Amino acid sequence: MSELKGEAMLGAVFGELLKVVTDAKNKSQEYESELEKLKATLESIAPIIQETETLNIALNIPEQETAKLKEELIKGTELVRKCSEVKCCCFKRVNYSDKLIKLNQSIERFIKVNMQTQMARDNKKMLEGVNEVFNQVEIDGPCSPPDPPASTPGLDAPMKELRTELVKDDGMQVIVVSAPGGAGKTTLVKKLCADDQVKDKFQENIFFVTVSKTPDVKIIVQRIFQHKKRNVPTFQTDEAAINDLEQLLKSIGQKAILLVLDDVWSESLLQKFKFQLPGYKILVTSRSVFPQFGSGHHLKPLNDEAAMILFRSSATPQDGKLSFFDENLAKKILRVCKGSPLALTVVGKLLRGEPAAVWQSKVKEWDQVKSIFISGTELLVCLQSSLDVLDEEVKECYLDLVSFPQDQRIPITALIDMWMELHVWVEDGLSAITYLHQLSDRNLVSLVTTRKNVSDGGYYNDHFVMQHDLLRDLIIHQSMSEPIERTKRLIIDISGNQFPKWWSEKKLNPIHARLLSISTDETFSSGWYELNAPKVEVVVLNLRTNKYTLPNFMGNMGKLKVVIVLNYGFLPAELSNFSLLGSDTASNLKRIRLKHVSIPSFDVQMKNLQKISLFMCNVGQAFRNSNLQISDSFPNLLEFEIDYCNDLLELPDGLCDIVSLKKLNITECFKLSTLPEEIGKLVKLEELRLASCTALTELPEMVTELSKLKLLDISGCLSITKLPTQIGKLCSLEMLGMRGCSSFELPQSIENLERLKLVK
């Protein structure tokens, strides 16, 4: 059937039929009525054909799935060509007229039935593509075991013992691993979860949950549901959550299940997670021994051989350069560290590359203490030493980490926002990263990247910091040594509605802190007392409730520059009283960062706001319901970040009127389908990131008017099939991110991008 057979694509076959029908209609009057109807049908389905082929290309769907439609279109092309040759009134004409009518009906019927099936399949494939991108938000599921360190000396023996207990079908259901803080309990269970025998036994049913001092049972259960890709229920009580968890685990069937509860403080918590299920085991780490669950496994300190291996690897420069290392001094340090892996690594990195005099001085200092474990606490003298040797600038940055809850990932972007306003020496994100690497090199923090395809060009939304809880305790202990009125950092943890006595009884004079952090749990009612803190420049609010009211006293903080609101609950928190941030008193506010909250509207004016960041927020309603255009709310905005906001369908009205805007980052917003044509009005825009906006179909041609644009990232935008034809007009473009965008040809004008240095 002509040249259309074989490898021709659906669009080409369809286009050929439409061309033949149009030509026949223009040249012949014999079948004008039939051809007119056929042409109208074809033109009406043209968008469907184009969309189908676009999805097929973007998602690598085999062309065999459109073979029947192609065959129908090819037959129609041959029919139209034949009937256009019939010019007399005869039986043939009537016959061909009937065939044209039947062809039109056949195509309409085929489109109505078969194309619905085709589009449903395409939508499913697109959803799979979106899910694939969604799954890249975190390297693993919400309850996947973290990877253990590459080297774990001294853990082979306890590893073997615990492995045997875990993989055998009988034995204890609850296995408790106890030891003081910093002894390597978490490392041991990470290593167990990565063991081949353990993985073979439990397969995909290993759930790793960090519990900490203030666990939320409902959130723990919700994350397990999320991990198993089940519909996540909303629970009113812990009992309801536990009941649903039991049913979920029963639905897994006869398969073995391992629940790892890391850093448990309460024996009563373990009772809630006990179920009479075959093959179900609970592995627990705790600083305490829980006699109700047997003697458990007490993790012993590292022996001298293992301790020396770990200390030597920590104290030896990784670049292979020679440095001072004295075996006798090292043995004295080992005696002081008492086999604690945390102490050994921190001290090792503290002394790495230092001359003999420093080693001797530290050993003399620690020799005066029987043990680096201070009596009555679990804080370590050596950790204090590691702080004392830090440069004052790095130390000040490190102490700010106490603003965030225990065992939670700290967004590096939040630290950058804080530090750039609190500390004059932090000039930008790059300098902040430099300080974090110095802390990581001393083992004071761990740096974590949570997405597989990390964005480029100084964008750190994928980067987090983790801190050992002992180190956090040390900072809190140090900050409590000062009177509350004079402390630089005021850290407040509220359980339920139990405020600190000094606050509820209003016994303090004005507080001079520059940094205020308030953490509340899921039972907090947002009933605030007044607080006189006129010098506060940064407020960090850590919350877990579904509804949260910003405290009125924030509106009286005349020096307030940064507001960070982080919700650690499972559902977005409804945030109210947002308008107080637009008060005249709070006119110095420069940066706002919101995580996992729902905002009713942006009817607030913040004339000096330079940056707003929205992560996992519900923002669609706020953009739709606001009486003010966003250009009136934030007229001098420099940076706008919207990341992983699933209800974002379109950008807010007036965004393109914020001519001051330099950075526009909209990533992982899977429902955003269009960009405003007037985006070219953002004449100062230097960065435009649209990574993983999978429903976005094109870049407006006006993008080419962004003459100062240096970075354009459309990585993971599966539905974009082409760049604007005049993309070469972006005379300042230096970096172009296009991961996953290999299915379309680049326009000729791209050769004009003379400053382009990097294409990914």
Image (tube, grey):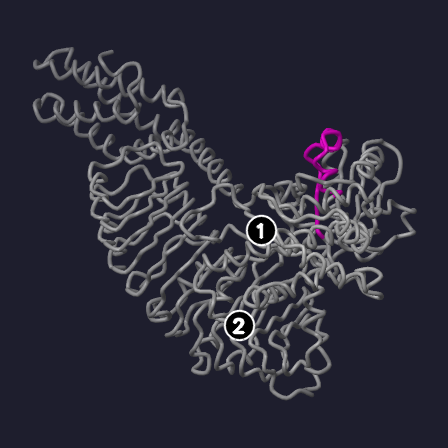
What residue is at 47 percent from the left and 75 percent from the top? 581
Q: Secondary structure at mark 1?
A: strand
Snapshot quadrant of residue 109: top left
Residue 107 spot, x, y in % from top left: 30, 25
Residues shaded magenta: 188-210
Q: Are marks 1 and 2 in contact (CB under 8 Å)?
A: no
* Front residue of this view, candidates 91 and 644: 644
Residue 293 spot, x, y in % from top left: 89, 48
Q: Which mark is residue 659?
A: none
Task: Kindly tell me whether residue 574 is visible in this rendering.
Answer: no
Compared with residue 241, is residue 381 higher up or lower down, i.e. above or below? below
Q: Which residue is mark 2?
A: 538
> On the rendered image, what quadrant is the N terminus found in?
top left
| Residue 196 magenta | yes
- On screen, residue 313 versus residue 65, left or right, reads right
Residue 363 spot, x, y in % from top left: 75, 58
Task: Kindly tell me whether residue 21 is visible in this rendering.
Answer: yes
What residue is at 75 percent from the left and 46 percent from the top? 327
Q: Amino acid at mark 2?
A: Val
- On screen, residue 338 versus residue 112, left or right, reads right
Residue 423 spot, x, y in % from top left: 50, 70
> On the rendered image, what quadrant is the C terminus found in?
top left
Q: Which residue is mark 1?
A: 447
What residue is at 23 percent from the left and 54 percent from the top? 707
Q: Amino acid at mark 1?
A: Leu
For marks 1 and 2 on the same chain, the one whose residue lies earlier in the sequence:
1
| Residue 677 magenta | no
As measured in the structure, the alpha-carbon distance from the residue carrying label 1 to the one carrying label 2 is: 23 Å
